[in-house]
Amino acid sequence: MNNRSFKGWLYLLPAILFLGAFMVYPLVDVFVYSFEEGYNSASQSFFGTGLYNYRYVLRDEYFLQALKNTFLLVIITVPLSTGLALLISLALNSIKKLRELFQTIYFLPYVTNTLAVGLVFMILFKKTAYTDGLVNLVINFFGGASVDFIDGPYWAKMFVLCFYTVWVVLPFKILILTSALASVRQDFYNAARLDATPKWRVFTRITLPMISPQLFYLIITGFIGAFKAYSDAVAIFGTDLNAAGMNTIVGYVYDMLYGNSGGWPSFASAAAIILFAIVLTITCINLLVSRKHVYYV
Amino acid sequence: MKVVLEHLTKKFPSRNKKDKSEVVAVNDMSLEIPDGKLVGLLGPSGCGKSTALNLICGLEAPTEGRIFFGEDDVTALPPERRGVGLVFQNYALYPHLTVRQNILFPLQNLRGEAKLSKEVMEEKVLEAAKLVQIEQLLERKPGEMSGGQQQRDAIARALVKMPRVLLLDEPLSNLDARLRLQTREEIRRIQRETGVTTVFVTHDQEEAMSISDVIVVMKDGVLQQTGKPQEVYNDPDNLFVAKFLGTPPINVFDGSVRGGTLHIGGDAVMRADGVADGAYTVGIRPEAFRVRDDGPLRCALETVEVMGRDTTIVSTHPAMQGVSIRSVISAEYAEGVGGDEVRFYLKCAKVHLFDPESGERVRFSSAEAL
Ligand SMILES: Nc1ncnc2c1ncn2[C@@H]1O[C@H](COP(=O)(O)OP(=O)(O)O)[C@@H](O)[C@H]1O
Ligand SMILES: [Mg+2]
């Protein structure tokens, strides 16, 4: 090993040690637990090895519900939030007056406390003894019947969860996309204009390819983030997500470890590994797709 | 297509928000660009060349004045309907598209009657690529090509839709010296072959002089002089133009005319008739100097630089402006030069008088070397 690479490794050492101790080692551990039947962390004992945990988890109604919820959340919120962020960024980019004001407004949720956001959602959606919530008032105004968004039908609860998720992730995406749009050189637009390029074509053939790296980054992190959703559901539906039927995979893992009926590290591990496999697969697919469509300068 | 600019003015609001003053980038510019000619728009950086070009192509709207293409007033016409091709200073090639796709891009925008079939488009792309000699590189991306090749790609993209006017904004400034020489000849050839009216912007006088049919010299948004390169060089209208054109640059002296004789410092150097007595700024081209043992202009010799056929004599004179006088002399006449002093007589046609205040040219009716 020459002196240079020795130094390089030396500088990397602290990070490697920390990552190894707190990321890699637990990951391997989880992988091992997931194949150990009835692992007990106190006595460090287990009954046997095999696919038992996976079999159990995959038949568990709560897990299947969590799986369904998570997938719905991902499929709805990732495209929706990214598309919405793109639309808003395009609008922000095309106005001159008050642009900074609007940018600030759109970024506010990002710096707002989660509890405050939760409170706002309560006021908007929650039915109490005194009021049906703001959204219901609006629905009533247009002649509809009140819907219980927090304890009511599944679609209503899913709607709130998706709404909340989109709203929370939007600011960051707008921030990234506005800066991406602003960095596209005006010359390209001028060149396109001189060639009488229709607006739509300018967007699809110039703007989109130029911001594709940032867009792709948002999509990949969006997928991963949505698959790992948990706290948002808790903020809206409380800690007993299984009862509410609004659990997510991460929520299921947590419940298996520490929930009311918890204490099952083996099942939790199996569920975590399943999630890991899903995220890995989706990310790989994303990367493959991006090869063709993302243009890096 | 002839292009006419009539009293064109472009003012920009100052970039500094606090001060309300305006930047006059182009100031009352009137100009006729003859059909099928290559016009070199020349001036120092920041003098409004790009702005003038943007006004012609329509990316900027003039504050005042009008623009005609042929007989059509295009002042209010949006850029996409003017039929101009613009080559940007940094080419602005779409980096994610191949050369072929870049050249194809303008053609794919054609709609309605002008719409072309795939085969015709392919043909035109190939034709344009051949014209600029990049037909071997059609599948490359801009990032995989040299500066010169990108330049050609950009020209092909501008030409493929058969523009009425081709505009080039400092097209050579991103190339290295050798490529610059080669590419400017290319541009000249392409312009000749297509016969398209072309405006070529540059801050490099040599570039403009070497390939333009007509040069247009600008300073601070104001047009200084137009004409054939050699004519403008030989007969500048003011000191700025005289100084801006020519390498090595013109030598400038403080002089005066007394009784029909031009004096530089203590030396009576030339007879100049038809000029009022008074102080003048005197510009003398490097090639105006002739060595003679009893020449009237006495300079202190610094060095003699022999460069092949020509010799440059570097000297100083008490009345000169700047740091030294550079005179270019045919090598055979420079043989006897040496010692502390070199004496010159002057070729009158290459000596110009300017008003010391305004810098305007003051022409003498006849002159004679002393
Ligand atoms: N969009 C603009 N806003 C304000 N000032 C500008 C703008 N474009 C150019 N200018 C000013 O106009 C002058 C001429 O600029 P430009 O035409 O780019 O010069 P050149 O191309 O000859 O270097 C400069 O002083 C420049 O600062
Ligand atoms: Mg410029």
Image (cartoon, coloured by chain):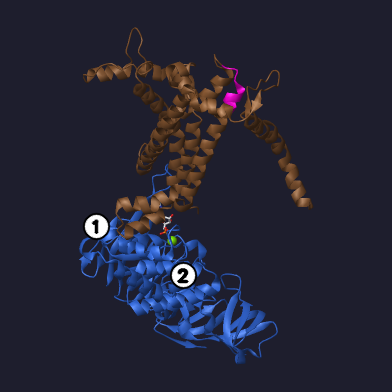
Chain colours: A brown, B blue
Q: Which mark is residue B137?
A: 2
Pointer 1 local density, CA inside 10 Å: few below 14, some 14–19, many at least 20: few
Residue highlighted by disc 1: B76
Q: Does B254 sit left or right of A27 as displayed?
A: left
Tell me the CA gap for discs 1 and 2: 39 Å
Horizontal and vertical percent position of residue B154: 41, 66
Q: Quadrant of ligand 2?
A: bottom left
Q: Nearer the viewer, mark 1 or mark 2?
A: 2
> Can you see residue A148?
yes
Q: Give the main secondary structure of the magenta stretch.
A: helix
Extreme bottom residue here? B332
Q: Give the range drawn in magenta.
A: A262-269
| Horizontal relation, residue B15 to residue B75: left or right | right
Q: In which quarter of the image is the N terminus of chain B?
A: bottom left
Residue at image location 60% in from the left, 17% down from the top: A263
Residue B58 picture location, percent across and down: 31, 59
Tell me the number on the disc at residue A41.
Answer: none
Tell me the chain of label 1: B
Q: Where is residue A35 in the image (x, y as percent from the top left)?
A: 62, 30
| Residues behind callouts 1 and 2 on a single chain | yes
Relative to A202, does residue A105 appear above or below in the rendering?
Answer: above
